Image (cartoon, helix red, strand yellow):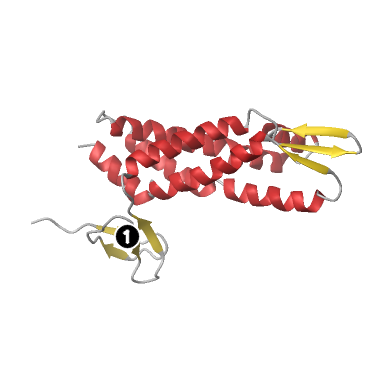
């Protein structure tokens, strides 16, 4: 006789009996009503495609001009990496490190590890160090702040729009596309789904 599986609520640690779920259904904690996860159609395929696309967009966002400022005929163009470097030069060392780690480094590491984990599973190959990779992905996810960075940039642009002509570069749109696809990837490959794949990859 099989024992019905349980999961612990991520917010209140209440043990939840796992029901049989249909596509696009969401599991909600009966104790605190917090959303646990949503089931998706073909989650492995979409996680890989969205993850790979968002990784490509992140690389592109670091390869072209992000924003240009035209002040009285003088044009200054910056890239994402230059933005972090400029903060460092202006002695905002801690802020520069935060921008570099949480906006650039961690998203790239998260997506790379996710693809390293999921692509072998997709093709029925043995996924080495799957448990360790899954733990790293779980550690990285809460600290990735792509959406917060976009909001911060938009607020900053509103404040300086009267002081200079702003030219939005290709990297700006690439990063917005990355943020959208990254959010989709993280939602589809949620914690429950990720460990389901890892568990079946070990068998």
**Does residue 52 appear left or right of residue 91 in this picture?**
left
Question: Camera-side residue: 142 or 189?
Answer: 189
Question: Camera-side residue: 6 or 20?
Answer: 20
Image point (52%, 31%), residue name: 56
Locate residue 178, reporting x and y percent.
Answer: 54, 40
Image point (81%, 33%), residue name: 76
Q: Residue furthest bottom?
A: 31
Label 1 belongs to which residue? 25
Locate residue 128, reporting x and y percent.
Answer: 31, 29
Q: Residue furthest left?
A: 1
Locate residue 54, reporting x and y percent.
Answer: 50, 37
**Does residue 166 appear left or right of residue 10 in this picture?**
right
Locate residue 102, reporting x and y percent.
Answer: 59, 42
Report the number of numbered marks. Answer: 1
Q: Quadrant of the N terminus?
A: bottom left
Image point (45%, 47%), residue name: 184
Residue 9: name its quadrant.
bottom left
Q: Residue furthest right?
A: 72
Q: Secondary structure at mark 1?
A: loop
> Crowding near pointer 1: few (<14 within 10 Å), some, many (20+)?
few
**Does residue 117 appear left or right of residue 126 in this picture?**
right
Residue 86: name its quadrant.
top right
Q: Quadrant of the C terminus?
A: top left
**Does residue 33 appear left or right of residue 104 in this picture?**
left
């Amino acid at each position: 006789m099989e024992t019905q599986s349980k999961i612990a609520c991520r917010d209140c640690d209440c043990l939840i009996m796992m029901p049989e779920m249909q596509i696009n259904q969401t599991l909600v904690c009966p104790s605190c009503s917090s959303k646990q996860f949503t089931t998706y159609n073909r989650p492995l395929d979409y996680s890989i495609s969205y993850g790979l696309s968002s990784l490509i967009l992140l690389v592109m966002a670091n390869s072209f001009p992000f924003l240009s400022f035209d002040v009285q005929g003088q044009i200054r163009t910056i890239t994402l990496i230059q933005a972090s470097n400029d903060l460092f030069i202006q002695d905002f060392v801690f802020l520069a490190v935060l921008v570099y780690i949480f906006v650039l480094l961690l998203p790239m590491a998260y997506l790379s590890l996710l693809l390293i984990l999921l692509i072998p599973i997709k093709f029925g190959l043995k996924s080495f160090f799957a448990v360790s990779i899954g733990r790293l992905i779980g550690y990285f996810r809460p600290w990735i702040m792509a959406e917060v960075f976009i909001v911060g940039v938009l607020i900053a642009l509103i404040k300086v729009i009267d002081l200079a002509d702003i030219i939005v570069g290709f990297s700006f749109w690439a990063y917005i596309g990355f943020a959208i696809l990254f959010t989709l990837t993280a939602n589809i490959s949620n914690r429950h789904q990720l460990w389901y794949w890892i568990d079946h990859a070990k068998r």
